[in-house]
């Protein structure tokens, strides 16, 4: 694979190619198996979409022994007058200034209240996903899988269409000048 072809495929993928990918893609580019190239570049690609969920939805998506501590954590945050120790520790660890900790507590408190309403919370929203990551960071063993499961509800496969690969390689190989 030429440097131009690699650059073209990196543009299609939206990221640098890994060494193993370059090795696997070389023969595919040489034979111009654009469908197989698109499939290889699509491995693990997901797009996040809006997906609202309520407390009822969380209880449906998670096993009871997993849903209960998750919802309890949010309920306790909603009732807290001060930033709980676990939250302060996590926020400090990720570099959030102490002066901003109360704003995070308020956001967690809102999440619990919103989960009780028909509209729920949007698992695809960047803020929601960031808050979920903080929960996972607080106790990976307890909340890591819970957070992964909830975040996955807002994700769907995002394969790269083979025609994008074809166009990029045609241009890189001088077969198309548009």
Image (cartoon, rainbow, N blue to C red):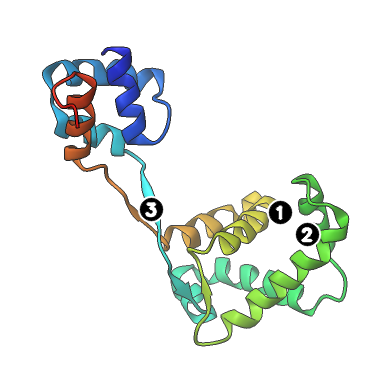
Element carrying mark 2: helix
- Answer above or below: position of 52 versus 133: below
Which of these two is toward me, 151 or 72? 151
Alpha-carbon distance for marks 2 and 3?
29 Å
**Residue count near mark 1 (Cα–Cα under 10 Å), binned few <14, some 14–19, many ≥20:** some
**Residue count near mark 2 (Cα–Cα under 10 Å), binned few <14, some 14–19, many ≥20:** many
Farthest residue in the front direction?
178
Residue 8: mark: none
Q: Residue at x 41, y 23 (%)?
A: 18
Mark 2, residue position: 87
Which of these two is toward me, 174 or 100? 174
Asked whether the beta carbons under mark 1 and mark 2 sit within 8 Å of each other, the answer is yes
Q: Mark 2 or 3 closer to N-term? A: 3
Which of these two is toward me, 133 or 97? 97
Mark 1, residue position: 138
Q: Residue at x 42, y 63 (%)?
A: 153
Mark 3, residue position: 47
């Amino acid at each position: 694979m030429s440097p131009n072809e690699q650059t073209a495929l990196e543009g299609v993928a939206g990221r640098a190619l890994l060494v193993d990918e370059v090795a696997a893609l070389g023969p595919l580019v040489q034979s111009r198996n654009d469908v197989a190239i698109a499939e290889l570049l699509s491995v693990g690609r997901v797009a996040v979409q809006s997906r609202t969920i309520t407390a009822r939805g969380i209880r449906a998506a998670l096993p009871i022994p997993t849903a209960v501590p998750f919802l309890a954590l949010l309920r306790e945050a909603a009732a807290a007058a001060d930033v709980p120790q676990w939250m302060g520790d996590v926020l400090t660890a990720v570099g959030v200034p102490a002066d901003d900790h109360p704003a995070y507590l308020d956001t967690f408190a809102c999440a619990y209240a919103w989960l009780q309403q028909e509209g729920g919370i949007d698992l695809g929203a960047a803020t929601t996903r960031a808050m979920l990551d903080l929960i996972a960071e607080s106790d990976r063993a307890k909340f890591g899988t819970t957070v992964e499961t909830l975040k996955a509800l807002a994700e769907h496969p995002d394969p790269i269409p083979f025609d994008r690969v074809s166009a990029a390689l045609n241009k890189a190989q001088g077969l198309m000048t548009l």
